Image (tube, helix red, strand yellow):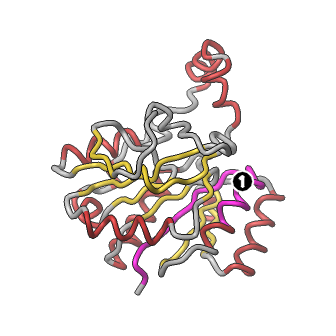
Amino acid sequence: MPEAIIITPVKDSKETTKRTIEAVTGADGDFEYYVFNDFSLPDTKSFLEESSKKLGFNLIHLEDLTTKPSPNYKMVLEMAQQTALYKNKPLIIIESDVVIQKNTINELIKLTALKPNAGLIGAITINESGSYNFPYALEKKKSSEVVNTSRSLSFCCTVITLGFLQKFDFSTLSNKKDWYDVFISHQSKKAGFSNYLAKGIEVLHLPHSSRPWKNLKYTNPILYYCRKLVSGYDRI
């Protein structure tokens, strides 16, 4: 039996996705890996199919299961939770703009045993220069601490523990949202768990590679919020 179920939702961004998948499949640890293709373009789809045969991960095309346009994060979370509960193991989300280190998965799994009251445990994100970056740029002080945090954790590279998976049903998530990390972080605390940020487990984050328009939030926030309001994108 694996020690964890790992998922990566993919929407194009072929180059970062390639780095993510190669890092995960090359990492130490005993885990099952599922890649969810959320209506990527044909070139990315072909790449994923070839990589799945070569590297041995499980590939799920959401276009075979739904006609709802991307993003389909709720569906991904529901399917991942069902698998994790069936296997009786924690779920680790590693998004397609994140590059983990060889020991990342093992270190996160160890923390689930060391922090039995944890609901979520997130690895901290860094840029190419090694500085903390989005979404944890507010963490200025470098350390190897595992911090009990009241802030929301991102799903960039995060464990959802078995205990929390057994208490909160992802099928109850709102269909009116696109992203759920903030809400699920709050539900973890509400259910009596603690959320931890592992500052000693660093992963490279290349933000918003699959949806580059979201970078407008930092370069042109007025345009970003106008587009979000008019188009209904990026519902948190």
In magenta segment, residue 14: yes
Residue 179 pos. (x, y %): 48, 41
141, 226: nearer the viewer: 141
- Name of the residue lying farthest toward the top: 222
- In the rendered image, residue 173, in percent from the top left (x then y), is placed at 36, 46
Q: Which residues are magenta?
A: 2-21
Is the C terminus in the top left, top right, bottom left or bottom right quadrant?
top left
Residue 121 pos. (x, y %): 36, 55
Most foreground residue, 98 or 217: 98
Q: Quadrant of residue 57?
A: bottom right
The structure residue drawn at horizontal position 45% and vertical position 31%, both measured from the top left corner, is 138
Say what secondary structure mark 1 lies in.
helix
Q: Residue at x 32, y 44 (%)?
A: 185
Pick the quarter of the image with the N terminus. Answer: bottom left
Instruction: Give the percent coordinates (x, y) of residue 232.
Output: 56, 27
Residue designated by label 1: 16
Residue 141's image quarter?
top left
Q: Residue furthest right?
A: 43
The reply to whether residue 69 is visible in this rendering is no
Which residue appears at 42% of the width and 49% of the height?
199
Q: Is residue 13 visible?
A: yes
Figure check: 213 above or below 94: above
The stretch drawn in magenta includes residue 101: no
Judge left or right: residue 154 versus residue 161: right
